[in-house]
Image (spheres, rainbow, N blue to C red):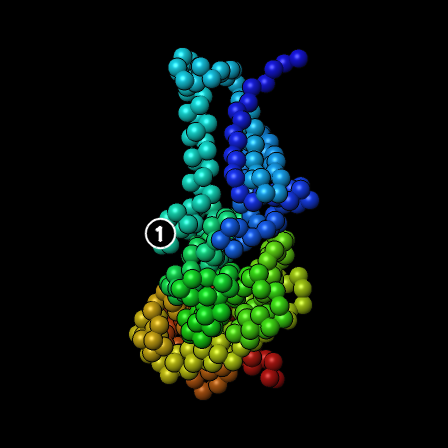
Amino acid sequence: MEQHSAILVKVRDTGVGIPEDKLPHVFDRFFQASEGANGQQGSGIGLALTKEFVKLMGGEITARSRAGEGAEFVVSLPVRGDLRLTTDDLRSGRSENEQVSISHVEADVEHLTENTFVATALPMEVCEATTERDSDLPLLLLIEDNPDVMTYLKSCLSDSYRMVAAVNGQEGVELATKLVPDLVVTDVMMPVMDGYEVCRFLKNDERTSHIPVIMLTAKAGLESRLEGLELGADAYLAKPFHREELLVQIRNLLAVRRRLQRHYRSVAGIGGEHFPIKLTKPAAPVMTESEDYFVKKLRRVVDAHLDDYEFNVEGLCREIGLSHSHLHRKLTALTGCSATKFIRQIRLSKAKELLENPGLTITAVAFDTGFNDPGYFGRVFKQEFGMTPVEWRERMAGVEN
């Protein structure tokens, strides 16, 4: 029978131990055997993650304990290749090849650790890892002070989303206002600023009021849930939560935001027929007065400068009081249009109305809607509506007759 070498790692403590009836469950996610010596309870994720790491390396982990006598955890990791070492070999370093194998193992473990805990090890400004492949994925902001829970969240979401992370509420709102993410997942109990304060800030700031917020908490009582929902939270998950439950909530909230885009385009007076969205479920979005007001305010500003061909995004930003990046991100989230396209859509929408007046020439319509080049106006109009201004006017005249 072939002999397989293994590295054994034993960790033993002299604490209160683990009750025998709870020992089989210590590697289950979110399982909490008892409070620690300082009266605080863990998250129930650390041992579950450890087991996953050990399994990835083809090993096993076991636990032994008796109440009042401490606990011992044993990790067995297989030695791959031709590595066959005794204790004396390790001490003397007799085999160059074997030393290289050990260094590879150490490097792999170091690499795994660095990538796993990147959210808490790096400054908040550089937590987001963006590549060309995933640059179009929705951006999520995770606000969580527990490194184990943060790691678990990242493992749940890394395949489908880009992520940035903050370790307390204050860092979270700073990142939210700076980046304007597509969705926020926040813990409730955190230092500096808790999740309720985060939600209150985001929902009352014009730059971030549209962002869906999911709150996570171990406080599962009705009073706690109502407090979060009254502050504007879009979903409330009690710990322990299941990975699929979190993913479904995120997908649903992002789908609602996409459906809302048609509503806000209609509020802006630019219609939704030119921005087709394929829906798999009936739309049931919840419209908010603040977002309606914001879009209507943008429309009023553009209308006030409709015949000014020099009016552009910078001018709109000055009138609204938002930076270019904030306006672009919020407007894109609300309507699916960039700020430049939003202004152009309003101009073209108004042009359609004016073309119904036979007393206005095509050139007059172009100038009245902020196009100082009638030729360019004609090309843009056809690109948007599939026909020239003249063809549109003739079509409308035919319908009326």
Residue placed most toward the observer, 383 or 166 = 166
Residue 248 locus on image (x, y percent): 62, 58
Residue 193 figure quarter: bottom left
Q: Quadrant of the C terminus?
A: bottom right
Q: Residues within 10 Å of mark 1 (few under 14, many from 20)?
A: few
Residue 159 locus on image (x, y percent): 54, 47
Circle 1: element type? loop
Residue placed most toward the observer, 194 or 307 = 194
Q: Tell me if residue 368 can be seen.
A: no
Residue placed most toward the observer, 264 or 399 = 264
Q: Among all residues in the image, which is located at the extreme right?
A: 21
Residue 191 figure quarter: bottom left
* Residue at image point 39% right, 15% down: 92
* Residue at image point 39% right, 61% down: 171
| As drawn, 35 above or below 27 | below
* Residue at image point 56% right, 79% down: 396
Q: Quadrant of the N terminus?
A: top right
| As drawn, 41 above or below 346 | above
Residue placed most toward the observer, 270 or 149 = 149
Q: Is residue 54 left or right of residue 374?
A: right
Q: Tell me if residue 284 can be seen.
A: yes
Say what amino acid the circle numbered 1 marks: Pro
| Residue labelled with disc 1 | 123
Residue 287 locus on image (x, y percent): 56, 76
Residue 368 locus on image (x, y percent): 38, 81
